[in-house]
Amino acid sequence: MSLRERDYDIIVAGGGLAGMIVASSAAHYSNELLRILVVDRNPLSVMGKKTMTGWICGDAVGKKSVEYMSKRIGINWEYPEIEHPVKGVIAYSPNHKTAVSFDGEGYILNRKLLPQKQLKDAIERGIQVRDRVALRSLIIENNTVTGVEGEDLVNKSVFRKSAKVVIDCTGVTSVLRTNLRIKSYIQTKIDRDDLEATGRYIYDFDIASKDDTFFHPDYCIIHLDQKLAPGGYGWVFPKGENKVNIGVGVQQRAFDLRNKEMGLRRDLKMLIDEYVHINPVIGNPRVATSEMDDGNGWGTWSVSVRRQNDCMVANGYMVVGDAAWMPKPLDAGGIGPAIIAATIAGRDAVEAIEANDTTEKELWKYNKDYVNDYGYKTAGLEVFRRMLQGLTNDQIDYGMKHFLSKMDVDKITDGEHPEFGTVDKVGMFIRGALNKRLAENLKCTASMNERLMQHYHNYPADPEHFLDWQKILHETLNDAFVKLS
């Protein structure tokens, strides 16, 4: 089947946040001349819904990421899809004695209402949307993805459509990526330890007391505490003066070990309920049931916390957002990276189609463009995350108090790895063997980050040099993990 014989120019698999931005980006860069189809398993009224329990997410995104999209493709968000503005993030040490403020404007989104705004924008740009279709597989011809196949959930008939490019935005558990049956460099499966189990409530509540370390209407609050959230963190993100997105993310292996140590059999919901219970500000919490939240008040989800997929393209195929493991390794924030990647992917797909060449080599530009704009810093943050997951609460308390400089905070605010330059300055005053080991590990992560960022700046411009590049990447990562173990 030639490119001219396809049903569509682009099929976007998945009508969530990333999928709708990809489609709108492609429409923008093609002057709305391409035939673009978005396919989602949900009815139009609940587009992008992740599970039966809702659009499970922390809901937070930085203003810079939204502006990245707006300036390039003219998509603008405002109230009510932007539910609440914030001034920054404050991370608290386990003992609550050290607060690190990451200033930078951001938004708390309403993930139930946002898809309706995205759907409206897409339709206005001439994009077709097919709802209630469960995609099961990719159509393959001559080692090339040429379309998608699935089931129409209304009449149970076979759904089968062809396209010049299929862009996979079906999430971290993507069956399309997992079962990819063509020769490619895309990693199809993720390691269990690179996933965080997360869950959250959206609560209306009464203010029981005032304690800015547990709730602030202008700041997203993060609690680092290995007892409270093993291998992860707890969050309290304001959605108003009396409304909150509150949840916990854990590394499952660390959570299981913590349960074993305590002789408990808690599941994630029980852990989150404990977290809510100890919050002195949140009184009489009620699952939000207003029209803007009904059906989205509680849920759990798995989030990747590694670097993005080493390669995100194959012949006729691209992966974007959670399907490409894009959430930030340090905090599992996935909205910002997805916005950036989706904006880029739409443009690069259009360029390949206009060149009448949607092979891996022509689509490769998406790999390079995303790495240059954002992805270059994620491998270093993956190393930092691994190091943090192995710390005790005492080490976290000590490190946050003594080792974070203003420059380090600014770097983390920008999504980059801190340098920990103060470690050398206070070296002779560091007390305790564990804290000295912590100092050594912090310097190690900073050094490894420099190596990894430089390596990503040398990301190959074509597939021919990819395996050599990937070999060095994995050797560097393995070296870091051994040193930090």
Image (tube, rainbow, N blue to C red):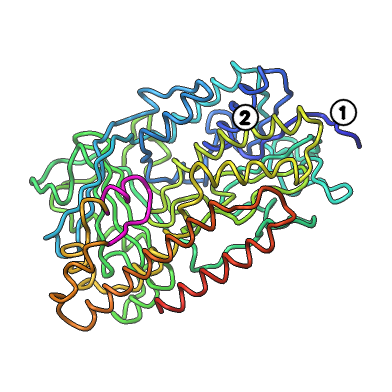
The x and y percentages for residue 288 are 31, 38
The residue under label 1 is 4
Q: Residue at x 28, y 31 (%)?
A: 85
Q: Is residue 236 left or right of residue 10?
A: left
In the image, residue 239 sits, relative to residue 199, either above or below, namely above
Q: Quadrant of the N terminus?
A: top right
Residue 419 painted magenta: yes
Quarter of the image where one finds residue 443: bottom left
The residues colored magenta run 408-420
The x and y percentages for residue 341 are 55, 40
Q: Is residue 365 left or right of residue 70?
A: right
The residue under label 2 is 23
Q: Earlier in the sequence, mark 2 or mark 1?
A: 1
The x and y percentages for residue 68 are 45, 31
Q: Residue at x 72, y 39 (%)?
A: 166
In the image, residue 166 sits, relative to residue 424, either above or below, namely above
Query: What secondary structure is found at the residue carrying circle 1?
Result: helix
Q: Is residue 302 visible?
A: no
> Given the current orientation, which residue lies at the most extreme left position?
209
Q: Is residue 473 visible?
A: yes
Q: Is residue 43 left or right of residue 255?
A: right
Residue 323 painted magenta: no
Q: Where residue 451 is drawn, which disc sits there?
A: none
